[in-house]
Image (spheres, rainbow, N blue to C red):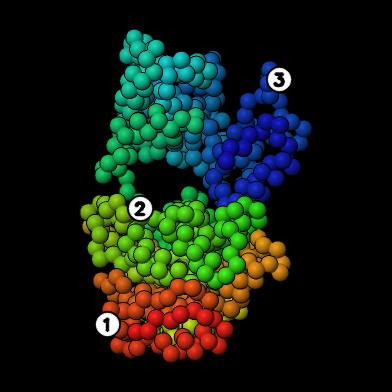
Amino acid sequence: MHLTCTDMPAGKVDEALEKAYNAGCTNILALRGDPPREQTEWTAVEGGFQYARDLIKYIKKKYGDHFDIGIAGYPEGMEKGQDKAILMQHLKEKVDAGGTFIVTQMFYDAENFIQWMKDVRAAGIDVPILPGIMPIQTHAAFLRRANWSEAKIPPSWTEALEPFKNDDAEVRRIGRSLVAEMCRKLIDAGIFHLHFYTMNLAQSSQLVLEELGLIGDDSGPQKSLPWRQSLGLKRREESVRPIFWANRHKSYVARTQDWDEFPNGRWGDARSPAFGHLDAYNIGLKGTNEANRKLWGEPKTITDVGNTFAGYLEGKVKVLPWTESGLSSEINVIKSHLIDLNKRCFFTINSQPAVDGAPSDDKVNGWGPKGGYCYQKAYLELFVPHTLIDKLVERVNADIKLTFYAVNKAGTLRSNAPPEEEGPNAVTWGVFPGKEIIQPTIVEKISFLAWKDEAFKLGTDWARCYDAGSESRHVLDSIMDNWYLVNIVDNDFRRSDAIYHLFDGLVAPGSSHVAPTAANGTNGTNETNGIHDLKTFNEASGSAVPVLAS
């Protein structure tokens, strides 16, 4: 977030910072800003800040190290005639006040920037420098922006672009090569970050990135971890995360902001007084009730809810309460299983297929350094009717390679993990040349119980989108109040379907779908499908759901 001193008294700054904090924002670009249009010279607003360094000190005093604070750098000066030594002094003052990275004004003279960078390091400033790269969209815009920022244009650039100034496509093509070559010089000089000013026009930036080999082919950078890392100052070294928040990145970062152990490679210390608390983190359902009803319709039965979940997997529903984005491509391997489960009204909210040694540069399952291999255990997380939990637990316990945790809204926990083995169970890991085994995704009892509160709250929030007494409110509340949240891990990463065979022959009460059975008439655990028990339950609940005999 950009935060300037222009027309910003301390009260407005407090409001902006509070909103940024609650939204999970961990990066602020702190600027003095330009004077308002009606003023010719900069003056601080009453109760405001005179310089960017004052704003930085204020942020640090209020929020400590929560925010990474970016500051502006000017390789070619802010205005003509300014003393470069004074500008360097001001830059160091901003860093000393708490600035943690520098974003520079746009420029096109690579040699001048590299010399400025050397001067910055010589002044004792060692924070990351992000050079401001302005791709070339049209010749007129190129000149206008360069003149506005007083950026020097190398004569060779003028010679290359001037003959084609009226041909926008050719200007973009030539500009791509010029800007890409400048970026290569910066990288060769020791720059590790490039900051592109896209101006809401993606094409020119994309062309430069393609020429640099950073996107568009297999030579580009890979995911360092199988989940999106936080950019927060205290969390850059975080390397382990519970799988439960795989689809709730923003919520996870916000909830765990004050937990303790990130630099030590653990996702958080369960003994932290902040662990598990929900009220302060604003992790509930987003969007208005009206907007959410448009997303998910008016489910009146269990089958309606199942169709909504299946619709998400089929691309008909954009998101669910437990997801922040669309499906990942790795789900394609197990999508048919998931759709079948949801149509039988077992509501899946998180899953991953088994992976037995995918190359680390694989476009679907790869992550980490090149030359390695990635592995993961089959994982499934879903809501299960309380009336079927005993049958499911019985089947899981019949397979010694399966482990599970199940909990209801009231906190009743069931598991087959021995007390001495309730620590982290790695469900994703990578093997890379010259490195220790990396285990970035885990299942753990204490984190599952923390996630439980959030998972049930999201479902309850969905129910509250509908009027009290409505059929939709009733069916969703019934699920959240009575069903179990279950996660199952197949610890044999070479198997792919064992988890899904646990549900052979089972249908949630109220579902209008019938359940397939295993090809040999068993559920894969050398027992019958338990049809009698299910039929008894359906009759007891007044359901007329047909049950498929094995």
Horizontally, residue 403 falls left or right of residue 288, namely left
Where residue 134 appears, as percent x and y from the top left, is: 44, 26
Q: Residue at x 42, y 16 (%)?
A: 139
What residue does disc 2 label? 224
- In the image, residue 57 sits, relative to residue 395, either above or below, namely above
Mark 1 or 3, which is nearer the eye?
1
Could you give the CA–CA distance between mark 1 and mark 2, rounded to whole angstroms?
A: 43 Å
State the residue lying farthest toward the right: 46
What residue does disc 3 label? 39
Q: Earlier in the sequence, mark 3 or mark 2?
A: 3
What residue does disc 1 label? 520
Where residue 369 appears, as percent x and y from the top left, is: 28, 52
Tag 3–tag 2 contact (CB < 8 Å) = no
Could you give the CA–CA distance between mark 3 and mark 2, rounded to whole angstroms?
A: 48 Å
Where residue 326 appears, as percent x and y from the top left, is: 45, 53
Residue 403 in view: no
Mark 1 or 2, which is nearer the eye?
1
